[in-house]
Structure formats: C-alpha cells, structure tokens
Amino acid sequence: MWPPSDKTVNRQKKQLLVNMTQLKQAVSLILFFVLLCPTSTFAISIPDELKLGKEYLQLMKNKDVILYDPVAQKMIEIVGNAIVKPLPPQPFHFDFFMVNDDSFNAFAMPAANIFVHSGLIASLDNIDELAGILAHEIGHAVGRHVSQSIDRSKIVATGSLAGMVAGILVGAAAGSSEAGQALSIGSMAAGQSAMLTYTRENETEADQKAVLFLEQTGYSPQGILDSLLKIRQADYQGIENIPDYFKTHPGTAARVSHLSGILADYKPPADKPAPPKNFDYNMVKYRVIGLYGDTDTYIPKIEIALQNDPDNVAFHYGLGLLYGRSTRINEGIEQLNKALNKDPFEPMILLELGRLYISNTEYTRAITILDSMADDPLLGDWAIFNRCVAQIQNGNLPAAEKGLEHVLGSGKPGFEKANYHMAEIMSRQSKQALSNYYLGVYYARIHDEQNAARQLERAIETLDDEKMREKAQNELENLEGKGKKEEGTRIEYFNNFITPHQNA
C-alpha cells in the first residue's frame, strides 16, 4: 500500500525483516524445489512455466513485499518495455515490479516476471544503469533460464528434497523459526555445486543478450558495467557474506571482467535510436529513498549532500519526505516548499506536500494543493485519494465519498486504504452495515483474513441492499476459497513430494 502510514512505519520495518526471511525461504522453495525435482514432476512447457510464474507472483503479493509506487513503477515499466519492444515475439508477457527491500538486487522469475528492489533504485545514478540491469534480467527471461534449470536438474541429487520442503513448511508454521530456517538452508546446500556453474553461465549469457538488446533502445550498455562496479564497491548489509546459493547473481567479478572486454571495443550503431522520454532519474531515486529508505541512514547523508549542492531539487524533495516520516513534519514541509520554489509545477512535489499538510492537520491548505493536480495523468488519482482524507477531516463527507468511489473504481493497485476511509465515512453517517462491508474489504486486501471474515459476516447479517449483500458474500467466499487453496497447496506438496521420497 502506498504511501506508508506514519503510524505503521516502525511496525512495517520489523515485519519487513520477518517477511524477507520468509520470502527468501519461499524463493528457495520454488527455485530449489524446481532444481532438485525429477523432470517427470515439473515439465518445462510454456503452460507450466506460466502456472509457476503466476503462483510465485501471488506469493509475492501475499507477502506484501511489492511496492505499488506510481512513479517508480511507471519508470521501471517505461524502461523495461522499451527494451522488450524491439524483440521478436516472446512466449510470455513481460511484467515489472518493485520489491520493498533495501538490498542492491533485481531478478527474473518464471514467465517473464521481473523484480527490482527499492534498494537498487536508491543506489543507481542514472537511467542507463537501470536499463542495463533490466536488460540483463530480460536476458534471463528470454533465455528461459528457469526452464533450462528444470531440464538440467536431473543431474542434481534429490535426496534432500524432502528435508528442504519440510524445513520450509516447519519454518512457515513456526513463524520462520531458526530451526526451520536452518533445516531448509541445510537441505538447499545439497544442490549448491551443480547449480552454481550453471547459474554463472546464465549470467554471462544474460549479459551478452543485454548488450544486444540495449543497442536497439538508445540506452548505453555501459550502464550494465557501471552498475556491476557499484555492487562490488558498495557495502549492502554484509551481502558479500551471504552464501552463493542465496544470491540471485553470483560471479560478479567474472561478469565485470567479461563485460569490460565486450565494451572495450564497443561502438554504438550509427542509427541508434534516442531512448524514450522518461522521468528525472534523480527525482525518482530520492522519492524512493524518501518514502521507503531508512530514515536514520539517509537523513544525515542527504543533509551533508545539500550543504555541497544547496540548489539540488531532488535532495530537498528526498529530505522532505524523510523528515515527514520522522517527527520532523514542519521541517519536511519546509524542504518540500524549497523544492517547489525551484520546480513549481512538479506533480511529485505537489502530491507529497499536500500529504504532509494533512499529517500536520492543515487540511484546507492540503485540499488547495491537491485540487491543483487532480487531473494529472499519473498522480491524479493519488491526489484525489489524499484530498478525500483531508475532506473527511474537514467534514465534507459527500465529496470524500464521491472521490473514494472514483479511486476504488479505477481498479489500480495500492488503494487498499480507500476502503478503510469509506468505512469511516459510513460509520460517521450511521450506516454501520456498509461500514462493516468496507472494513471487511480493507482487511481482506491487507491479508488480515480473520478480521476480514468477521466484518464481512456482520455486513451480510445486517445489509438491507441486496446487491451490497451479494458483494459482501462474494468477498467472504473469495476469502474462504483462498484459505482452502493455500491449505490444499501445502497438502499437495507434502503428499506429492515428501511422502514419495520417504517411501523410496
């Protein structure tokens, strides 16, 4: 959900550590599960890869690690699609996502789902570097490297499969207990040697493809090499100490050497096109830092940077967002106003300034600013959403209700909390049944199934409107169906993969 609630920032930081531990286990479950399974279990057909990609994507969504930031998401899509566009027809549709994680990483998963970590955006310096990394991941997807891994997995011993799956299940059931995690990691190590050589070969192939892809886009292939050099030079929470089988991109030193050789004699084609018009990368970078980066880490860094470059709009913007997430809201407003004075019509600044005015209980001022950008093609719906929050506080419930209906009707991701505010409006209007309905939908969207079921059941019991009661019933059935599917998947994994190996 974007933007993150100020009240939940600390809780989200703690939960993120748990989520990422579980996510590493989940990634390992799929990757190593696939790599260690006999080929008779997992085929490498396109339909099967599509199914695997869909399941993995749903897992990511359920873990709440995908960020639906409209600006960063649009930038990633523009760059990624520019690279994909000149390619010959592909068996999969390419989709791009940003993951809420501070590490310098990106990865491709089955069926051309490409994930970029927020820490990667925060660490790169220009659009060419982002294009280079995306081109590399697209190279993995075009090469169908996951499918090739499945095909070659018959050379890897399968004896540790049962222990690995059991470790994942134990870890998930115990809330990622250390014992469960250790069991899964120990089981994964069995296939390490066979995987690493193959993965490094994939890395080389993906780099070679990336250079070819970038020749047709207008982005410079030098960006791949520059980004790799940053990986080597930077200290990202001890990432170099993580075992190779836990990294998505091993063999960095060899890749740097190989790419340096390729680019030493590289000459861009004479008819190389201009890259598509895009965002100011620095503004997006400091937006990501400001909204999702660690405040204690970045505030002092940007304060020092501003001393050396006091007219830098992106620095003022990022620092304002960081202050806004701490207890320094007035200073955040001051920094955003400084950025706005230098770039008076920038929607990114206007939106966040309006949001900080709401946090500062200056609702009328917030409404005025947000009104000015409600028609913006990218951020207009977010301006309307935040304006509705201010209108609720000002007592203009009809206008807020109309705006929230528009936002929810758009079907865009990230507006989960619009349901919460609709519930608030209904409660203030003494429409308790409708309040229960919207609150139930809100809890369902944030994966709080217990509270969602409770609120939806209350709504079904008390709603007079037949259509709304039917919608509540459908929401409840979807909730129950999801729970049964997850339990069925777990049982299927156990029956199909653990039991046979135990019997063998």
Image (cartoon, rainbow, N blue to C red):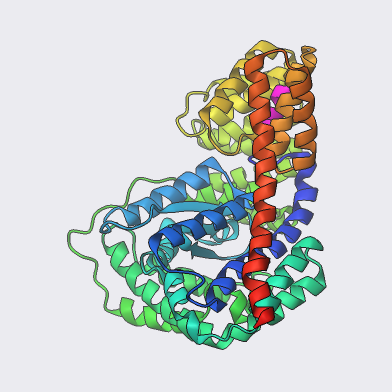
Q: Nearer the viewer, residue 211 or 484?
A: 484
Q: Which residue is pictured at 42% across the width and 74% down the height?
A: 148
Image-based side of 292 in relation to 249, left or right? right
The reply, left or right, for residue 433 in relation to residue 198 is: right
- Main SS of the magenta part reads helix
> In this picture, is 413 found above or below 392?
below
In which quadrant will I find the N terminus?
top right
**Residue sitting at x 71%, y 62%:** 22
In this rendering, the answer to whether 404 lies above or below 93 is above
Quadrant hosting residue 388: top right
Residue 377: image quadrant is top left
Residues shaded magenta: 417-424
Query: Is residue 423 magenta-colored?
Result: yes
Q: For the C terminus, give its image quadrant.
A: bottom right
What is the tally of numbered marks visible in this picture? Answer: 0
Tell me residue 427's x, y (percent): 79, 18
